C-alpha cells in the first residue's frame, strides 16, 4: 500500500450533468490532494461519468436521480464501507476551491469537532441572507453559512449521515445540520472563499422566487418538526 | 329502499376488492381495510337505525351529517396512511439505488482485476 497523508480521506462530489466543469474541478483538486476523489454521478444524461473517470476520479453511477443529498449519501455510505475516517463534500460546478481542503482539515483538528463547514457568508443575494437568518432563528443552529456544500465530516458524523434516518432529506443544509445537532455532534465553521460557478449559472436552490419559496417552506416544516419539545411532551 | 341501496353498495365494494385480488391487481395487505369498509356499509344497510342511535348519543341533531363525518374521517386516515407508506417506499428505493451503485462499482473493480 502506498501511504500518503490523505489516504484515509475521501472527497465526495455529487454531479448531475456537469460535463462542462467536472474535468477541471477534479484536476484542480488533484493538485492539492493525494487521496481518493469520488464522483457520484446522479443519473446524468451527458458524459459526466466518463470525463470524471478520465480525469482520475472514482465514479459511482446512480441508476435513478436521487438529488444532491441522495448522491452525497451514496458517497458517505461508500466512505463508511471502505473505512475512510474523513469525508469532504464539494460541489461539481467549480465554486469550491481546492485550496479550501487543507483549511477544512486544519479546522477539524484545531476545533476538535465532528463536522466543519466551509463558510462564505459574503456570497449571495438579500433573499439568501434573509433565509439564513430565519433558519438560524428557527433551528437554533448558530452557524454563519447554513447552506454551504463544502463540508468535512469525521467518522461519527459519516456513520450518522449514512444511516436510513438521513435518507429522506433532500438537501445538504439545515436538515443535515439539525440531525447532527440532535445527535450532539460538534459542528464548527471555517471561513473560506467561493468563486463564481464555472458554468456562470446560478444556485440550484436560489434561482427563482418560486424555487426559493418552495425550499423555504420545505425547510421551515423540517425545522418545526424537529423543534425541541418541553420535557412533559416527550 | 334505504337498506337495499346500502346492501348493493357494500356487496359491490366487497366483490370489486375480491376481484382485484383475484386478478393480482391488489396486494391482499390492502384488502383488509376495504373489506372492513364494505362490511360497515352492509351493516348500516341492515341496521339503519344504528346511525340515528349513535347521532342522538353524540348530540348530533341531523344524523346523516354524522355519516358524512365518518366517511370523510375514514378517507383522511386512509390517505395519510398511503402517504406514510409512500415515504417508507421512497426511503427504500433511495437506499437500494445507493447500494446498487456501490455494488456495481465493486463488481466493476473485480472484473478489471481479473482481466
Image (spheres, coloured by chain):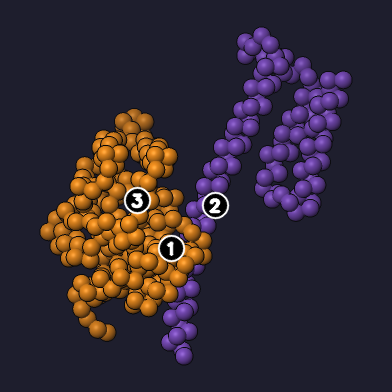
Chain colours: A orange, B purple
- A9 with respect to A163 (left or right): left
- Name which residue lies at 72% across and 14% down: B52
Q: Element at badge 2?
A: helix
- Determine which quarter of the picture holds residue A68: bottom left
Which corner quadrant holds the N terminus of chain A?
Answer: bottom left
Residue B92 spot, x, y in % from top left:
51, 56
Decide: is A139 above or below A111: above
Residue A159 can be seen, yes or no: no
Spatial CA distance of label 3 from label 2 is 30 Å
On the image, the x and y values in percent for residue A43 come to 48, 63
Question: Residue at (31%, 61%) from the top-left corner?
Answer: A198
Q: Please state if A103 lies on the left or on the right of A1 as rendered.
A: left
State yes or no: discs 3 and 2 in contact (Cβ < 8 Å): no
Q: Secondary structure at mark 3?
A: loop
How many numbered discs, if any? Answer: 3
Same chain? Circles 1 and 2? no
Q: Which label sits in the foreground, 3 or 2? A: 3
Camera sees residue A169: yes
Mark 2 — on which chain does it sit? B
Q: How would you rate the neighbour count of disc 2 (Cα within 10 Å): few for under 14, some for 14-19, many for 20 or more?
A: few
Chain letter for mark 3, please: A
Q: Which residue is mark 2?
A: B89
The chain containing the residue under callout 1 comes to: A
Q: Which mark is residue A191?
A: none
Q: Is residue A22 above or below residue B64?
A: below
Residue denoted by label 3: A203
Q: Identify the element where label 1 is drawn.
A: loop
Q: Which residue is mark 1?
A: A17
| Of callouts 3 and 1, the N-terminal one | 1
Amino acid at each position: 500500500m502506498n501511504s500518503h497523508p490523505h489516504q484515509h480521506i475521501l472527497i465526495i462530489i455529487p454531479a448531475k450533468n456537469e460535463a462542462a466543469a467536472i474535468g477541471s474541478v477534479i484536476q484542480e483538486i488533484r493538485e492539492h490532494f493525494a487521496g481518493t476523489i469520488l464522483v457520484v454521478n446522479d443519473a446524468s444524461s451527458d458524459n459526466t461519468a466518463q470525463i470524471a473517470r478520465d480525469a482520475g476520479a472514482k465514479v459511482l453511477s446512480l441508476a435513478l436521480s436521487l438529488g444532491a443529498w441522495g448522491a452525497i449519501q451514496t458517497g458517505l455510505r461508500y466512505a463508511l464501507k471502505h473505512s475512510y475516517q474523513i469525508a469532504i463534500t464539494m460541489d461539481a460546478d467549480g465554486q469550491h476551491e481546492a485550496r479550501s481542503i487543507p483549511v477544512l482539515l486544519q479546522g477539524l483538528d484545531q476545533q476538535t469537532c465532528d463536522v466543519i463547514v466551509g463558510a462564505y457568508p459574503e456570497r449571495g443575494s438579500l433573499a439568501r441572507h434573509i433565509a439564513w437568518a430565519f433558519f438560524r432563528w428557527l433551528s437554533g443552529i448558530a452557524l454563519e453559512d447554513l447552506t454551504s456544500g463544502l463540508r468535512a465530516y469525521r467518522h461519527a458524523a459519516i456513520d450518522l449521515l449514512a444511516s436510513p434516518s438521513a435518507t429522506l432529506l433532500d438537501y445538504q443544509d439545515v436538515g443535515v445540520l439539525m440531525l447532527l445537532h440532535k445527535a450532539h455532534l460538534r459542528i464548527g465553521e471555517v471561513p473560506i472563499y467561493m468563486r463564481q460557478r464555472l458554468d456562470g449559472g446560478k444556485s440550484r436552490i436560489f434561482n427563482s422566487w418560486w424555487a426559493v419559496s418552495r425550499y423555504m417552506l420545505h425547510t421551515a416544516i423540517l425545522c418545526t418538526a424537529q423543534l425541541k419539545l418541553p420535557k412533559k411532551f416527550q | 329502499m334505504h337498506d337495499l341501496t346500502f346492501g348493493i353498495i357494500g356487496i359491490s365494494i366487497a366483490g370489486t376488492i375480491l376481484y382485484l385480488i383475484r386478478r393480482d391487481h391488489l396486494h391482499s395487505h390492502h384488502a383488509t381495510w376495504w373489506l372492513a369498509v364494505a362490511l360497515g356499509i352492509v351493516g348500516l344497510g341492515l341496521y339503519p337505525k344504528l346511525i340515528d342511535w349513535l347521532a342522538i348519543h353524540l348530540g348530533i341533531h341531523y344524523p346523516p351529517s354524522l355519516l358524512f363525518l365518518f366517511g370523510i374521517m375514514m378517507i383522511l386516515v386512509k390517505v395519510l396512511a398511503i402517504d406514510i407508506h409512500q415515504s417508507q417506499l421512497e426511503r427504500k428505493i433511495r437506499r437500494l439505488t445507493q447500494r446498487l451503485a456501490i455494488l456495481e462499482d465493486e463488481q466493476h473493480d473485480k472484473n478489471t482485476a481479473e482481466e
